[in-house]
Image: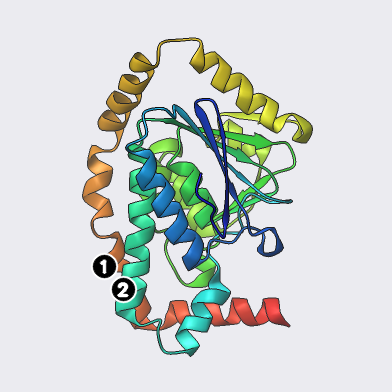
Amino acid sequence: MKQFETLLIEKNNNTLTITLNRPEKANAISPEMMDELLEIISDLRYNSEIKFVVFKGAGKHFSGGADLSKLMEQFEAGSYTTAAARLIQSKGLEITNKLEELEQVTIVAIDGSCIGGGLALALACDFRIMTEQATISIPEVERGMFFTWGSTPRLINIVGVAKAKELIMLCDTINSEEAVRMNLVTKVTPKNQLMDEVDKIINKLDSSPFMPIRLTKKIANAASIGLMKNVMIYDTELFEQSILSGEPIDEMKKFVNRKRS
């Protein structure tokens, strides 16, 4: 398998495990990681040998979300223009759309923090397994943004309109007990049993013929995402207009400066 800078790739029979590998940055999603995620997910579309794809994070966390410090570096260098912001969002939307449309069954193993863009990846997958100590949060509104990458309609599809508004607008951090209660995650497990639980799901799925599983995924997605796609086409344009207001840049600067101080 190809070696990546920000991802670890491990193949075991018909299962591919993709590890977000920036533990020193809580696996924050950098532009480089976005490029590599898009590459590996695009390649998987044509790989019939792989039937199951597992995402996890290196170190203590699944993902701290988008790497805003990288975006601020681009802004200070003059390369993070409104047009560039729209294209980055377009790439994020392409990643989550392609991930959602994979024929493989996708499973996310969540430990530690799963924030913003990390949750966007998880929402595009079929199964989400969470440790008892893990937490989920969507801080985008506090950063002057909305929940992008097609994630707002996906979240609504999973937890309902009222709960999605609550999670996005209030920016509260939720624990595993609340996450499973609202069907945001499939199952909660002790920390030391996280990957064992992932293996159990894969073994259970692998004991059945894969064709009806693959078809069920396609039918379920087709039944649930029709209206969502109509909303997603505006995602990148809305983000560009948000950047034009200046508010997201100001709030991201404040956040990055707090982290640096």
Position of 130 relative to 87 (above/below): above
Position of 246 relative to 46 (above/below): below
Q: Secondary structure at mark 2?
A: helix
Q: Are marks 2 and 1 in contact (CB under 8 Å)?
A: yes
Q: Mark 2 = which residue?
A: 240
Q: Residues within 10 Å of mark 1 (few under 14, many from 20)?
A: some
Q: Would residue 190 appear left or right of 96 to someone viewing this image? A: right
Residue 197 picture quarter: top right
Q: Residue at x 31, y 73 (%)?
A: 240
Position of 223 relative to 254 (above/below): above
Q: Residues within 10 Å of mark 2 (few under 14, many from 20)?
A: some
Residue 69 picture quarter: bottom right
Q: Residue at x 50, y 16 (%)?
A: 206
The quarter of the picture where the C terminus appears is bottom right
Task: Give the percent coordinates (x, y) of residue 80.
Answer: 40, 81
Q: Amino acid at mark 2?
A: Glu
